[in-house]
């Protein structure tokens, strides 16, 4: 057994935890919408057609936001097709995923579904094939109280009160050649700035998210982001970051060190934001919206062959995938001063922790880390100083065996710890030392582990990979926990202020 130490001082706060980092994403892709969140006529659905069992499980994530309707889908869709009497809505060929879109679920249904779930909508506008004026009209439709053409159309469609959507994405992944309406950075920057000016002119209370680069593998990575930030700086509030993690080569040691790469990517974004802010001598703060993140590599089939709600990208998740998801969330905590929004992509059926059949629902391994973080990470994210072994991380080189993040809630004195043992071979005895408080008890201690890192839940056995209990020993200001190889633990400690002398 190897040993590691985590040193904490609750005075060393990074920033308050923004609960919006526990948000989700649903796109018109595969069965995410139809047969996912929306399934009229199913006995498991309510009178609006919303799957009640899906809503119940999603509530466990405490998602403050859900991003919609895409994703690649948004860059070729027309929001006007999705409102008004359902029988009059057109069926359209859907460019991104070569599927048929029936438009039976649209803007109003999405907002109603968000209300039923208890979350807020995060709306994306089409800046690929769409006109800037269409984006402004969507804000008018959603947010103005009435007395104008599109706000009155909303009222006529059964929604007297404004939808009051506060967060708006200015397109999606516009540096990607696969994107409908893809353009160079300077063209997109001009388009996004003009859209933001129009949209905020209609509702000055909204916030906007500009498209960052699609990922570190893009030839335009960071150069795109700098160009867009320089042009759009006065008109935007966030820049998006996207990352999908993969283990295509079955290099599990490298895969389990993903947190190192995630940290580096976030730090790249923070650096380019800081550079542009300095260049402009601006005190304005622009933050990161990490609004697509997940593990995705097993089911990448994205051709719907012109079917309606085809089975696409229905990834099966195992233990190692859950450990990587935990590292995403820990990285967001470690960078709580930069990352204010994050959306797991996606939430039902499509690369999702939840899968549905007509009469049942399956919870996958990746569901649990998000549920635990959202429940326990309250208050301030605090600095973690880790001493411990360095392991061979395959194609990643070397990495710390222990990935750690922590929060402190001053209201109740709770310190929450999130720990991943990346080693495939060695148990890790972790000693947690608090410099400024005593530990009075353990409020909770959960562990995700299986002897087979490839183990996954199945329809026949849904409890193969799920949290269990882990023992935490306490001695004054120190707690110790043993992490099997590999594993993820979420531990909440009760603490009291230390009285010197």
Image (cartoon, rainbow, N blue to C red):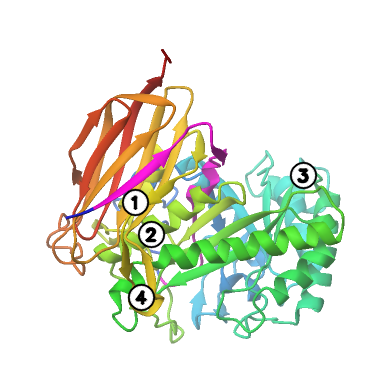
Between the residue at mark 2 and the residue at mark 4, the CA separation in whole angstroms equals 23 Å
Which tag, 4 or 1, sits closer to the chain's start? Answer: 4
Contact between marks 3 and 4 (CB within 8 A): the answer is no
Between the residue at mark 3 and the residue at mark 4, the CA separation in whole angstroms equals 38 Å
Question: Is residue 474 or residue 251 the one in the foreground?
Answer: 474
**Which numbered dot is residue 311?**
4
Contact between marks 2 and 1 (CB within 8 A): the answer is yes
Give x and y (percent) for residue 301: 39, 83
Q: Label 2 neighbourhood size at 10 Å, few (<14), some (14-19), many (20+)?
A: many
**Which numbered dot is residue 453?**
none
Foreground disc of the pair 1, 3: 1
Is residue 52 visible in the rendered image? The answer is no
Which tag, 2 or 1, sits closer to the chain's start? Answer: 2
Q: Which residue is mark 3?
A: 144
Between the residue at mark 3 and the residue at mark 2, the CA separation in whole angstroms equals 38 Å
Q: Which residues are magenta?
A: 3-30
Question: Is residue 490 or residue 67 the one in the foreground?
Answer: 490
Which tag, 3 or 4, sits closer to the chain's start? Answer: 3
Is residue 203 visible in the rendered image? The answer is yes
Q: Which residue is mark 2?
A: 325
Foreground disc of the pair 2, 4: 2
* Residue at the outermost front position: 501
**Which numbered dot is residue 369?**
1
Foreground disc of the pair 3, 2: 2
Contact between marks 2 and 4 (CB within 8 A): the answer is no
Q: Residue at image x 32%, y 39%? A: 432
Q: Label 3 neighbourhood size at 10 Å, few (<14), some (14-19), many (20+)?
A: many
Between the residue at mark 1 and the residue at mark 3, the CA separation in whole angstroms equals 38 Å
Between the residue at mark 4 and the residue at mark 1, the CA separation in whole angstroms equals 25 Å
Foreground disc of the pair 4, 1: 1
Q: Residue at image x 77%, y 74%? A: 188
Which tag, 3 or 2, sits closer to the chain's start? Answer: 3
């Amino acid at each position: 057994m190897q040993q590691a130490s985590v040193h904490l001082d609750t005075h060393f706060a990074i920033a308050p935890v923004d609960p919006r980092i526990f948000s989700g994403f649903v796109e018109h892709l595969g069965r995410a919408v139809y047969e996912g969140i929306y399934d009229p006529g199913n006995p498991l659905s309510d009178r609006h057609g919303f799957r009640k069992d899906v809503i119940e499980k999603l509530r466990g994530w405490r998602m403050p936001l859900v991003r919609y309707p895409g994703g690649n889908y948004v860059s070729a869709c027309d929001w006007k097709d999705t409102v008004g009497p359902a029988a009059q809505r057109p069926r359209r060929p859907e460019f991104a995923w070569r599927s048929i879109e029936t438009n039976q679920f649209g803007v109003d249904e999405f907002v109603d579904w968000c209300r039923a779930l208890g979350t807020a909508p995060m709306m994306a506008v089409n800046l690929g094939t769409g006109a800037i004026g269409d984006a402004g009209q969507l804000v008018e439709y959603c947010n103005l109280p009435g007395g104008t053409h599109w706000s009155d159309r909303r009222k006529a469609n059964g929604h007297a009160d404004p939808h009051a959507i506060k967060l708006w994405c200015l397109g999606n992944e516009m540096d990607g050649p696969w994107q409908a309406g893809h353009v160079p950075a300077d063209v997109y920057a001009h388009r996004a700035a003009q859209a933001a000016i129009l949209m905020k002119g209609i509702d000055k209370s909204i916030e906007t998210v500009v498209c960052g680069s699609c990922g570190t593998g893009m030839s335009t990575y960071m150069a795109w982001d700098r160009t867009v930030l320089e042009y759009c700086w006065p008109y935007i509030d966030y820049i998006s970051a996207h990352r999908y993690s993969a283990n295509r080569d079955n290099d599990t040691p490298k895969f389990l060190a993903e947190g190192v790469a995630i940290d580096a990517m976030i730090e790249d974004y923070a650096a380019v934001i800081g550079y542009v802010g300095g260049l402009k001598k601006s005190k304005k703060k622009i933050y990161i919206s990490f609004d697509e993140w997940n593990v995705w590599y097993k089911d990448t089939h994205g051709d719907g062959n012109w079917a309606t709600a085809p089975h696409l990208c229905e990834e099966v998740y195992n233990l190692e995938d859950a450990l990587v998801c935990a590292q995403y969330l820990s990285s967001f905590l470690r960078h709580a001063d930069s990352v204010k929004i994050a959306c797991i992509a996606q939430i039902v059926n499509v690369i999702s922790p939840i899968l549905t059949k007509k009469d049942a629902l399956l919870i996958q391994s990746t569901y649990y880390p998000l549920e635990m973080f959202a429940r326990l990470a309250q208050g301030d994210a605090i600095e973690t100083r880790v001493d411990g072994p360095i392991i061979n991380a395959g194609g990643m080189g070397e990495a710390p065996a222990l990935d750690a993040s922590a929060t402190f809630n001053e209201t109740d004195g709770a310190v929450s710890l999130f720990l991943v043992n990346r080693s495939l071979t060695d148990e890790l005895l972790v000693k947690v030392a608090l410099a400024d408080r005593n530990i009075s008890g353990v409020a909770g201690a959960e562990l995700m582990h299986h002897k087979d890192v490839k183990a996954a839940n199945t329809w026949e056995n849904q409890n193969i990979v799920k949290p269990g209990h882990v023992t935490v020993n306490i001695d004054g200001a120190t707690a110790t926990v043993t992490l099997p190889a590999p594993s993820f633990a979420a531990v909440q400690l009760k603490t009291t202020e230390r009285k010197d002398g």
